[in-house]
Image (spheres, grey):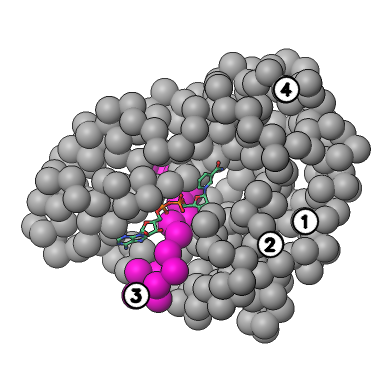
């Protein structure tokens, strides 16, 4: 497929490009993910919060692709941060996905101010990892201060930190912190849900090199070394977003994209977001 893999800190290889299913309606998910497999994607990013794990599982079953050829990530939902709840939520995720292991399981949000400390949650993730039923475990939306507490109070280093990253939120400080600690950064909403695609600097680069704005932005992520999984329900866009490995951005185009950073989030701020369903 031409998609490179990146080695996580425990040796597990993750395809650098995957397919995200946030906001794919549950009833459409099996068909959408089946199309993504046909296009060539072999890495799916879902979450219990997205309510579409069953659809992802149905697509995996239908595909006939060996389970070992597909990298599956899911996430622990808010509301299940207590140890026992986390272990049960993980079992439910496996059952809904129709698989006996995950490639990667993440704590979806750190949830400041709730009555469960995320250190307890991480210790449950360590138990899941030790059981062998998730080949790697990691976090999402953790800032450096959250990670430092895990380093001080727990044993297993998160393999990834999945955070919002795109040209309007370049996140260079947190990405550098992740890298210093052998944590791979995964960039969620890599095209800011489409918001960056009309940017004049991005469309100018795209026109000059004969690529689409989405390809330019996704290629920028790839060259920075982050993992991405853009979401689309259209087959054409799935193909467009998959065609990233036959061109390169120049150093100056890379710098121009990074220079668009304006600290602008499309999603919630992890230091205040504490929604529990
Ligand atoms: P995204 O940046 O991938 O943008 C997706 C939207 O952009 C699509 O709905 C479509 O409207 C548009 N689009 C896609 N391809 C396009 C193209 N080639 N040209 C024009 N428009 C295009 O946004 P996302 O879905 O929020 O993020 C990707 C994935 O990241 C999610 O599906 C999910 O797996 C993950 N995610 C994780 C968290 C988290 O808290 N961990 C939060 C948000 C998203």
In the image, the segment drawn in magenta is: 224-238
Image quadrant in which you'd find residue 118:
top right
Q: Nearer the viewer, mark 4 or mark 1?
A: 4
Name the spot of residue 2 as percent of width and height, x first. 43, 68
| Residue 246 can be seen in this image | yes
Q: CA distance from mark 4 to mark 2?
A: 26 Å
Mark 2 crowdedness (10 Å alpha carbons): few <14, some 14-19, many ≥20: many
Q: As drawn, is 265 to the left or to the right of 271?
A: left
On whether residue 227 falls in the magenta region, the answer is: yes
Q: CA distance from mark 4 to mark 1?
A: 23 Å
Up-down: is 80 above or below 133? above
Do the numbered discs 4 and 2 sit on residues whose CB atoms are within 8 Å? no
Q: Which residue is mark 4?
A: 114
Q: Which residue is mark 3?
A: 236
On whether residue 41 falls in the magenta region, the answer is: no
| Residue 138 can be seen in this image | no
What residue sits 55% from the left and 22% below the top?
Answer: 272
Confirm or reject: label 1 Cβ below 8 Å from ligand 1: no
Res. 93 mark: 1
Mark 4 crowdedness (10 Å alpha carbons): few <14, some 14-19, many ≥20: some
Q: CA distance from mark 3 to mark 2?
A: 24 Å
Confirm or reject: label 4 Cβ below 8 Å from ligand 1: no
Which quadrant: the C terminus? Answer: top right
Up-down: is 67 above or below 197? below
Up-down: is 132 above or below 172? below
* Picture mark count: 4
Q: Earlier in the sequence, mark 3 or mark 4?
A: 4
Q: Earlier in the sequence, mark 4 or mark 2?
A: 2
Q: Helix, strand or loop at disc 2?
A: helix
Q: CA distance from mark 1 to mark 2?
A: 7 Å
């Amino acid at each position: 497929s031409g998609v490179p893999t990146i080695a996580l800190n425990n040796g597990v290889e993750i395809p650098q490009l995957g397919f995200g299913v946030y906001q794919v309606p549950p009833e459409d998910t099996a068909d959408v993910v089946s199309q993504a497999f046909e296009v060539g994607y072999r890495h799916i990013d879902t979450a219990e919060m997205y309510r579409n794990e069953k659809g992802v599982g149905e697509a995996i079953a239908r595909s006939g692709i060996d389970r070992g050829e597909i990298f599956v990530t899911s996430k622990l939902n808010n509301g299940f941060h207590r140890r026992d709840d986390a272990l049960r939520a993980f079992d439910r995720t496996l059952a809904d996905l129709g698989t006996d292991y995950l490639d990667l399981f993440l704590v979806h949000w750190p949830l400041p101010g709730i009555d469960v400390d995320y250190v307890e949650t991480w210790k449950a993730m360590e138990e899941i990892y030790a059981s062998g039923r998730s080949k790697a475990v990691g976090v999402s939306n953790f800032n450096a201060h959250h990670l430092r507490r895990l380093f001080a109070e727990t044993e297993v280093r998160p393999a990834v930190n999945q955070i919002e990253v795109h040209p309007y939120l370049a996140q260079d400080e947190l990405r550098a912190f992740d890298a210093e600690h052998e944590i791979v950064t995964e960039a969620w909403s890599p095209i800011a849900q489409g918001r960056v695609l009309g940017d004049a600097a991005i469309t100018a680069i795209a026109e000059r090199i004969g690529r689409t704005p989405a390809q330019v932005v996704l290629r920028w992520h790839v060259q920075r070394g982050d993992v991405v999984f853009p979401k689309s329900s259209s087959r054409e866009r799935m193909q467009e977003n998959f065609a990233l490995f036959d061109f390169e951005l120049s150093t100056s185009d890379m710098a121009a994209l990074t220079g668009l950073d304006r600290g602008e989030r499309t999603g919630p701020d992890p230091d205040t977001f504490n929604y529990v369903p």
